[in-house]
Image (tube, rainbow, N blue to C red):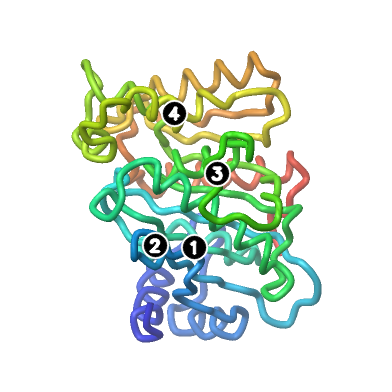
Amino acid sequence: MSKTILSIAVLSLAASGSAFAQLSPAATWAAQFANNYAITPNITYLVANNYEAKLDVYARRNTTGPQPTLIHIHGGGWTGGTKESALPFMMPWFEMGWNVVNVEYRLAKVSLAPAAVEDCLCALRWIAANSTQYNLDTTRLVVTGDSAGGHLALTTGMIPESAGLDRQCPGVPLPKIAAIVNWYGITDVGDLLDGPNRRSFAVAWLSSKPDREEIAKRLSPLTYVRPGLPPVLTIHGDADPTVPYTHALRLQEALEKAGVPHQLLTIPGGKHGNFNPDERLKVFSTIREFLTKNHLPAQN
């Protein structure tokens, strides 16, 4: 992302206000942001299928030692989207003083499933290997994303190394995620391939592979629910036309049975994101409470 694009994005988002706190006028806030964060954009963390997968690091200035860090993964049905579109989700975390790693991954037009899942696990390994350089605290990593990004946040936080989905980037052990914030993510990929919940983006991601049902199960967060997982907060509208609300309900039921700390924030009548200001205020207030409850910093 160019500095010009970033500045425009920061100014426009600052002008629109924030769920956590009343921002200063746009120019003042943007200046404060630039003073507080060092931005290292478009770092290549993986090369696969002749594609350079990149991430951006936003690291707080004037700090010493490891800092709590958010890993953000964008949505787009595994077929579209960009990491640059994630700024609205990241701004409240900047206000809380968190470092942020903003991750892109191979979309379906570059590589079909399971590439996106593999890439995000490789980004997690890159974070572990480069944590000292960027002051990233690998004991306080929260992963989040919306829609397909919510799915990838769940898989990144839940899939163990024994599943073998991290083998294209061997190296240091994968760090344990401290918490997952899942915005209306897919929890059962196979449910979207056929039947009443069939979705074209899921079909495009799995294509016509003869073993696509097996791959879908291997890439579904519900497959990996077990004791000892990090706490999971799910945000989902109960009228979501894109990712069925039942995906959230089934995840909560499975987490409850496994004894994993979990919370579901239902947005009554909520669609696939695009929540109104009051709903977003409730979401981010809930995120703060969730972080505090799980012994993670919710403010500077």
Label 3–label 4 contact, CB within 8 A: no
**Looking at the picture, which amino acid does disc 3 mark?**
Thr
Q: Is residue 190 above or below residue 166?
A: above
- Of the two numbered discs 1 and 2 on the same chain, state the one appearing first in sequence: 2
Please rate how many residues cluster around mark 1, counting C-alpha atoms within 10 Å: few if below 14, some from 14 to 19, many from 20: many
Q: Distance from label 1 to label 2 (Cα)?
A: 6 Å
Image quadrant holding the N terminus, namely bottom left
> Is the residue under label 2 in contact with that under label 1 (CB below 8 Å)?
yes
Q: Mark 2, mark 3: which one is toward the viewer?
A: 3
Which badge, 1 or 3, is on the more N-terminal residue? 1
Check disc 3 and report its element: helix, strand or loop: helix
| Cα separation between marks 4 and 1 | 22 Å
Q: Residues within 10 Å of mark 3 (few under 14, many from 20)?
A: many
The amino acid marked with disc number 1 is Asn
Residue plotted at (50% across, 51% down): 120
Which of the pair 119/252 is nearer the observer? 119
Q: In the rendering, at what x and y percent does residue 240 appear? A: 30, 30
Kind of element beneath mark 2? helix
Residue type pointed to by label 4: Thr
* Residue on which the image places disc 1: 102
Q: Tell me where residue 43 appears, x and y as whole percent.
A: 49, 74
The residue shown at (48%, 18%) is 250
Q: Which residue is disc 2 drawn over?
A: 83
| Residue toward you, 210 or 44 | 210
N-term-proximal mark, 4 vs 1: 1
Q: Which residue is mark 3?
A: 156
Does dot 1 land on a helix, a strand or a loop?
strand
**Callout 1 touching callout 3 (CB < 8 Å):** no
